[in-house]
Structure formats: C-alpha cells, structure tokens
Image (cartoon, rainbow, N blue to C red):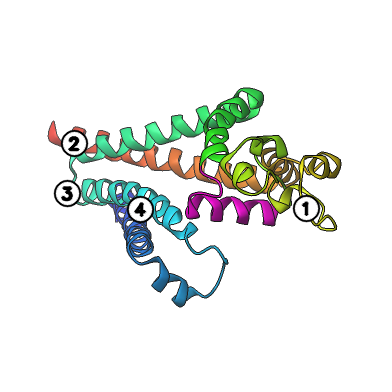
Amino acid sequence: MGCFTFIKVMMILFNLLIFIAGGALLGVGIWVSVDGSSFVKVIGPISSQAMQFVNIGYFCIAIGAVLVLIGFLGCCGAQKESKCLLILFFVIVLIIFIAEIAAAVVALVYSSFAESLLRAWVAPVLKNDYGRLKDVTGIWNTTMSELKCCGFTNYTDFSESYYYKNNDRTFPPFCCNSALSICNEIAAASSQIQGCFRQLFDILKENANIVGGIAAGICVLEIAAMAVSMYLYCKIDGKTHV
C-alpha cells in the first residue's frame, strides 16, 4: 500500500467516524428538541429543570450538522478523489480554526471586552426573561446553583427586573446566603455572592492546563485534517496531469 492510498484510507475512516458522531449528535438534538420529556425519562433526572434540554437540543443540532457536513465532505472527497469536495472540506475546517483562534484571542487578551459583549447580551435576558420564561429560568437556576453565583455580574443584574417586580421586590435566593430567609437588596448586598461570569472565569483559570490541552488537541487535529486534505488535493491534481 502506497503512501497516497494509506493517507486516503485514513482520511476516509477518520471522517466516517466524524460523520457518524455528528449524525448521532444531530439525532439526539432533534429528539431532545421535539420530545424533551421522553429524553429525560431515558437518561434520568439529571436536572430538576427539564426545560433546559430544549436549548441543549438546539446546540446539539448545530454542532451535529457541522460535524455531518465536515465528515461527508472529507469522506466523499477522499473516496471519490474529488478536488472540489476536498477544497470545500479544507475551507470549512480553516474557517472553524480561524474562528476558534479569534475567540481565544478575544477571551484571553481582551477579556474585559469579551465580558462587556456578553453582559450586553445577558443583561436584557436576566431583566426581562428570568422568572417569566421557564427555559431561561431553568438554565440560570441550574447555573447559579452549581457555580454558587448570582447573575452575570452580581445581584444588581436583577434590579428592577421582571423577577424582582413580581416577587415582592426580592432577588433570587441564590443571591443571598442560605441562612437568610428573605433575599432583599440589603441581604443580597451583605451576602456578596460573586457573579457567574467571574466564577466561571476563576474555574477556567484553575483548570487552565486541562482546557488548554483540550484546545491544543483540537487545533492539532484540525491542522492535521487540513494538511491531509491539501496533500490529497495536490496529489490528485498531479495525477490528472500525468
């Protein structure tokens, strides 16, 4: 078996696995979005707020669709020795790679800017939808419960919010120490519960080696995939001129 054939077979097998994984993720995402209650019954009561699976379902659909597309282009491009499919595979993986690098640079170098962008998106959700929409409320309750945090920045994110106005001008119980029965503004201020963004950022810093290792591994795989696709592209191009 020549080098070209070996790399071609590895390219097919690797992208076939990606295609299957993407299809499975896509199927789970559709199932969760259409019938989240049945999904919860199968996997068990992971969270008391089952409605959050609707959002997870959409996330799975998006990631699964991208993986299916990448797997299809890589597998068929290598199998049929199609220059068009291979270059499409290369371009899509390159776009994803550039987007990941850009996101990492913004998160690391411009963390305050990233925080401002996230706050501009999250603040209206907490003001208008928390306590009103079940899925938003469920996701934030789970997040604040697991991370032991309050809001995005702190309890002030809920000031004059829908929840605040419709719950006797009180804040979510996560914003106060458990010993306090009523979480009003005085109690929330004295509790000094940290915001979820800062809490999550601290967790990421504590696990920087693991996060960095995973990110580096993904980048290496993407670079390898692009290199192999370009190798096959060039070899196929050379064969057509023989």
Identify the residue at image location x=60%, y=25%: 116
SS at badge 3 = loop
SS at badge 4 = helix
Crowd rating for badge 3 (residues with CA inside 10 Å; few <14, some 14–19, many 20+): few
Q: Are marks 2 and 1 in contact (CB under 8 Å)?
A: no
Residue 222 located left or right of residue 106:
left
Mark 2 vs mark 1: in front: 1
Q: Main secondary structure of the magenta part?
A: helix
Identify the residue at image location x=41%, y=70%: 37
User: Which quadrant would residue 164 be assigned to in this image?
Assistant: top right
Instruction: Tell me the CA gap for discs 1 and 3.
Output: 67 Å
Q: Which residues are magenta?
A: 129-147
Q: Amino acid at mark 3?
A: Lys
Instruction: Tell me the CA gap for discs 3 and 2.
Output: 10 Å
Of pointers 2 and 1, the one earlier in the residue sequence:
2
Of pointers 4 and 2, the one earlier in the residue sequence:
4
Instruction: Tell me the CA gap for discs 4 and 3.
Output: 28 Å
Q: Are marks 4 and 3 in contact (CB under 8 Å)?
A: no
- Toward the viewer: 34 or 111? 34
Identify the residue at image location x=56%, y=69%: 46
In the rendered image, which residue does mark 2 sit on? 84
Crowd rating for badge 1 (residues with CA inside 10 Å; few <14, some 14–19, many 20+): some
SS at badge 1 = loop
Q: Amino acid at mark 2?
A: Cys
Q: Quadrant of the N terminus?
A: bottom left
In the rendered image, which residue does mark 3 sit on? 80
Mark 4 vs mark 3: in front: 4
Instruction: Tell me the CA gap for discs 2 and 1.
Output: 64 Å
